[in-house]
Structure formats: structure tokens, C-alpha cells
Amino acid sequence: MKHIYDCFIEKDCDMIEINPLVLTKQGKVLAADSKITIDDNAAFRQADMKKEEDTSQQNQKEQIAKEHDLNYIHIGGNIGCLVNGAGLAMATMDII
């Protein structure tokens, strides 16, 4: 756990997730899969991590928005919502 915490701080992480964490028949703990996200505002300090990013699962529209420093979340449908702030976004989407 200390190594995970140290990595979280050193690499400016938003999240480090291990899922699933497996207990083998031999009694060893194994991290079978993991995900790490880096704070976008700290990306300039983490250029080595940026090179490792797997974009194969990203939505193409979200990827284009990211290239232009825009936050975009594709949830399907044909209605868009342009807002300033998460609270307003959530309330507006609830109304829609």
C-alpha cells in the first residue's frame, strides 16, 4: 500500500485502481489488472507517463476534444449541453 501511495503522490495521480485483486491458491496476492489516471494539470511534469497512455479505448469525439483542451463526455443521443460547472451540468442533464 505504501508503494501505491508513493506512486500516487510522485506521479500526480487522480486515481490508482487495482481491480481485481486476486488471492492465488498458493496464498499470494496478485494485482490482476490496474488503472492509473494522471491529473491533466500536472501532465507537463509527467511526460514519461503521457507516452504510456492507452488511447485505444477512448471515444473518438472525446479524444478530439482533449486535443483542443476541452472537457467532453459522450453519453449518446443527439442533445448537447454546454455548461460552466459540474453542478449546473448535472442539473441541466437531469432536466433534459
Image (cartoon, grey):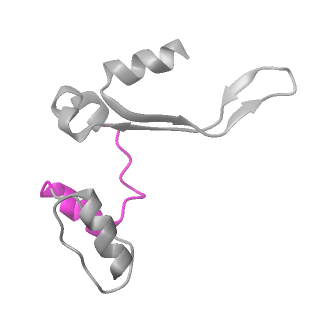
Q: Quadrant of residue 57?
A: bottom left
Query: What's drawn in magenta, residue-wise?
Result: 51-69
Q: Tell me where residue 89 sits by quadrant.
A: bottom left
Q: Quadrant of the C terminus?
A: bottom left
Is 62 magenta? The answer is yes
**Identity of the residue drawn at 30% across and 27% down:** 12
Magenta residue check for 63: yes
Q: x%, y% of residue 78? A: 31, 87
| Total numbered circles | 0
Residue at the extreme right? 25
The image quarter containing residue 90 is bottom left
Closer to the camera in the image, 88 or 6 = 88
**Picture quarter with the N terminus:** top right
Q: Is residue 34 left or right of residue 41?
A: right
- The answer to whether residue 13 is left or right of residue 28 is left
Compared to 83, does 56 lie above or below?
above
In the rendered view, does 20 fall on the left or right side of 23?
left
Which residue is located at x 39 percent, y 24 percent?
Answer: 8
Residue 72 horizontal/vertical position (percent): 25, 63
Q: Residue at x 34, y 80 (%)?
A: 95
Q: Position of residue 51 (x, y in %)?
A: 28, 37
Could you tell me residue 39's position as x and y percent? 27, 37
What residue do we see at 21% from left, 64% from top? 64
Report the front residue among 11 and 91. 91
